[in-house]
Image: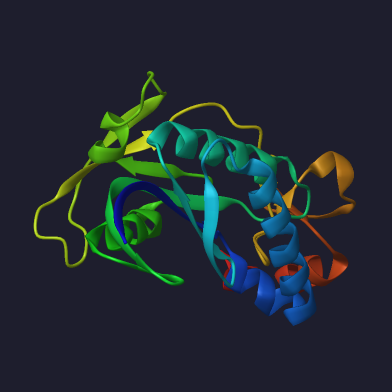
Amino acid sequence: MEKDVAIMMADLTGYTAMTDAHGGASAARIVHKYMELVDSALAGSATVFQRIGDQVVILADSPSDMLSTAQRLNQLTGDEHHFLSIHAGLHFGSVFIEGNNLFGSTINIAARIMNIAQRGEILCSQRFLSGLTSAAPFRSVGMHKLKNVPEPLELFLLDEPVKFPLHIDPVCHMQIDPARSTYAATLGQTTYHFCSAHCRDRFTADPEAFS
C-alpha cells in the first residue's frame, strides 16, 4: 500500500555513552521509559510504526498531528530528570507500506534529517512545513546536502522554548537538574553535575576523556 504520510524519526541523544557508563540494565530501563513517553505524546492520527532500540518511527496522516506529537515528546523527555534528550527529523511524502516495513525516499530523507539534528533539536523539511495547517515556530537553518539525496534540502528548526535541565552529565549524557542531584565536581571555573558517584569519579579521574 502506498500513501502520503507525515513521518518522524526520533532517537535518544547520548544513548551509546549512557549504555557504556551504566550497562545494559540501565539502557533497557531508559528505553522502556522512552517508549512510555512516546505513547503519551501521540496526537491525533499519529501512531508508532516501528521501535528499533532507542529509535522510533512514527507516522501520521497530517504534518499538524505529527508536529503536536513532536512538541509533546520533546517536552516530556525534557522534563525527565536522569534521562536523555531526543533529536528528531520530520518529513512528509509518499511511502510504500508492506507489513512492518516502509519503502521509498520519504523514510530515507526523514532518517537523514534526524541524523543532522543535535541534542533537543527537531528539524523538518520544507515539504513538511508546507503541509501544516497553521503557523509554527520554525526557522530556517539553511540548505543541507543529505547523503544519497540528489538536491540539497532547506531544513527548519523548531524554535520554541522547552524546559530542559541546566546540565548534561559529561560522562553518560544524562540530563541533570542540579537542584535534585548531589554529585558535582568543579574543574577550573566550571562546575559539572553528574547522575551518580560512578560518573563523577570517572570524570575526575580523567576529565580530558570527556571533554
Q: Is residue 174 left or right of residue 42?
A: right
* Closer to the camera in the image, 28 or 15: 28
Q: Residue 188 at x, y = what percent?
A: 67, 52
* Closer to the camera in the image, 56 or 112: 56
Q: Is residue 16 left or right of residue 179?
A: left
Q: Is residue 150 visible?
A: yes
Where is 191 relative to 26, above or below?
above
Which quadrant of the figure contains the N terminus?
bottom left
Q: Is residue 204 left or right of residue 141?
A: right
Q: Residue at x 83, y 72 (%)?
A: 198
Give the colour scheme shown. rainbow
Q: Residue 22 at x, y = what percent?
A: 76, 75
Q: Quadrant of residue 101?
A: bottom left
Q: Residue at x 47, y 44 (%)?
A: 121
Q: Residue at x 9, y 53 (%)?
A: 151
Where is 133 relative to 191, above or below?
above
Q: Residue 205 at x, y = what percent?
A: 74, 75
Q: Is residue 205 visible?
A: no
Q: Residue at x 75, y 46 (%)?
A: 80
